Image (cartoon, coloured by chain):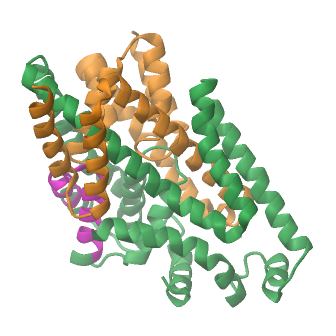
């Protein structure tokens, strides 16, 4: 694993996606394909990223650490900071860009595709984690709690951890 | 959100568009605000957004709720983490380029540091059977929350499509399901799917717009065609629903 390629993969994933989790499908493909990360690494990083402070997109920092240690998390941090800087230009071009139907259409298409692919990747994570009745119940329960909008993410995940200890411990 | 609000938002936006910030806040002050916010923001993006809203809208009144929502909407089309883009946007408006840089450092340094430490702590205990059992429980929950996030992302897009007509809704639904199905069946490079689906949606939006101008049914459509950026009353009412739906859902998310 060389640092430059590692950095480029993380940068590329963020450049070609929007949102904190949009880079997940691309990273999943690239890192798994090279054998630099495992499904388990992704599951762990997502879990830590949901609990830790800051944007959910910081799950990538966790992934960087799990796959390449301190250097990995530092490279991941630089990689995710660069693409959002484009907001400065977008902000300036806003009027012109906003009114163009193609641009609006492209942004929408991109978001739809990211969402569609994202669900498939999540399914893969669930499967590799061990798909049984307990896992399905935990997933549905967390969706239900999330829908209420009252339970903090931290609490939902802590409850799930307790369920895990009871079910699989 | 009713249209008058929206009109106000749009007219506000015009003078703030440039690089010149409305208000100079010192770099040191921005660094402090963002770091304090960052340390408190356990629980991911929704917690962070809530704290940003509280710090800049409620406590200091440096921007309106609408301005923040509009900024966030713009951040949706920027690559990478929306909240980092939003941080850059707020920072540059309040303190210029230095303000933007300082704000990002303030947001990321504490939260990234804590994330790394939490990951390191996790790797220490991950071989314990209890830790593995706990993680086996956490992963489905994280995946479930991810699915919920996807639904929340997809719903406003589908609603906006529905307002444009049945054809647009069917296309959006097909693109959503299709991109997932293509990954499952063909498994091509993900970037290709994203670009292809974006391209299809762009072409569809363009042809929809052209059809709209060729067969103008109302005065509003005529006016749009003649003065696309006029910002007339008709223009507002035409664009209104699409924009307000996005704003509403964003508002929901951080008032929770």
Q: Colour of chain B?
A: green
Query: Is B99 placed left or right of A93 in the picture?
Result: left
Q: Which range of residues does the magenta coloring cover? A: B33-57
Residue B150 % position (x, y) = 45, 49
Q: Residue at coordinates 86% horizontally, 72% vertically from top-left? A: B213
Q: Is residue B107 above or below residue B120?
A: below
Relative to B197, say whether A28 is above or below.
above
Instruction: Residue B204 in the image: state x and y as whole percent.
Output: 77, 54
Residue at 64% from the left image edge and 34% from the top image edge: B193
* Chain in orange in the render: A
Q: Quadrant of the N terminus of chain A?
A: top left
In the image, residue B190 lies at what x, y percent? 58, 30
Of residue A55 and residue A75, the one placed in the foreground of this image is: A55
Task: Name above or below for residue B89 compared with residue B244.
Answer: above
Q: Position of residue B42 (x, y in %)?
A: 18, 50
Q: Name the image quarter holding residue A96.
A: bottom right
Q: Is residue B36 magenta?
A: yes
Report the residue at 35% width, 17% height from top: A38
Helix, strand or loop: magenta stretch: helix
């Amino acid at each position: 694993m060389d640092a430059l390629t590692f950095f480029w993969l993380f940068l590329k994933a963020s450049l070609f996606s929007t949102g904190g989790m949009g880079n997940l499908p691309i990273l999943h493909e690239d890192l798994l394909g090279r054998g630099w990360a495992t499904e388990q690494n992704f599951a762990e990083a997502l879990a830590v990223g949901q609990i830790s402070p800051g944007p959910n997109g910081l799950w990538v920092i966790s992934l960087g650490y799990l796959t390449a240690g301190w250097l990995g998390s530092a490279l991941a941090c630089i990689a995710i900071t660069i693409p959002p800087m484009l907001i400065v230009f977008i902000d300036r071009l806003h009027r012109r860009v906003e009114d163009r139907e193609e641009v609006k259409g492209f942004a929408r298409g991109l978001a739809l595709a990211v969402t569609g692919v994202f669900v498939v990747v999540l399914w893969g994570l669930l499967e590799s984690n061990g798909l049984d009745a307990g896992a399905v119940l935990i997933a549905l329960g967390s969706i239900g709690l999330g829908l209420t909008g009252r339970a903090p993410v931290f609490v939902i995940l802590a409850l799930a951890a307790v369920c895990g200890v009871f079910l699989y411990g | 959100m009713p249209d008058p609000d929206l009109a106000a938002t749009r007219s506000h936006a015009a003078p703030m568009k440039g690089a010149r910030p409305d208000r100079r806040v010192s770099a040191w002050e921005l660094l402090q605000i963002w770091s304090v916010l960052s340390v408190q923001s356990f629980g991911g993006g929704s917690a962070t957004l809530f704290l940003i809203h509280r710090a800049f809208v409620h406590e200091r009144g440096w921007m309106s709720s609408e301005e923040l929502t509009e900024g966030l909407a713009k951040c949706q089309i920027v690559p990478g983490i929306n909240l980092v883009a939003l941080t850059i946007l707020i920072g540059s408006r309040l303190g210029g380029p230095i303000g933007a840089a300082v704000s990002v450092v303030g947001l990321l340094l504490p939260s990234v540091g804590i994330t790394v430490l939490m990951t390191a702590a996790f790797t220490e205990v991950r071989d314990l059977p209890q830790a593995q059992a706990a993680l086996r429980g956490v992963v489905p929950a994280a995946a479930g929350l991810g699915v919920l996030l996807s639904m929340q992302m997809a719903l406003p897009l589908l609603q906006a499509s529905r307002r444009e007509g049945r054809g647009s809704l069917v296309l959006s639904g097909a693109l959503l399901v299709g991109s997932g199905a293509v990954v499952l069946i063909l498994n091509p490079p993900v970037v290709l799917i994203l670009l292809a689906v974006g391209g299809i949606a762009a072409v569809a939006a363009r042809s929809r717009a052209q059809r709209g101008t060729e067969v103008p049914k109302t005065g509003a459509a005529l006016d749009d065609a003649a003065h696309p950026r006029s910002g007339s009353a008709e223009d507002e009412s035409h664009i209104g629903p699409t924009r307000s739906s996005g704003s509403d859902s964003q508002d929901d998310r951080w008032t929770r």
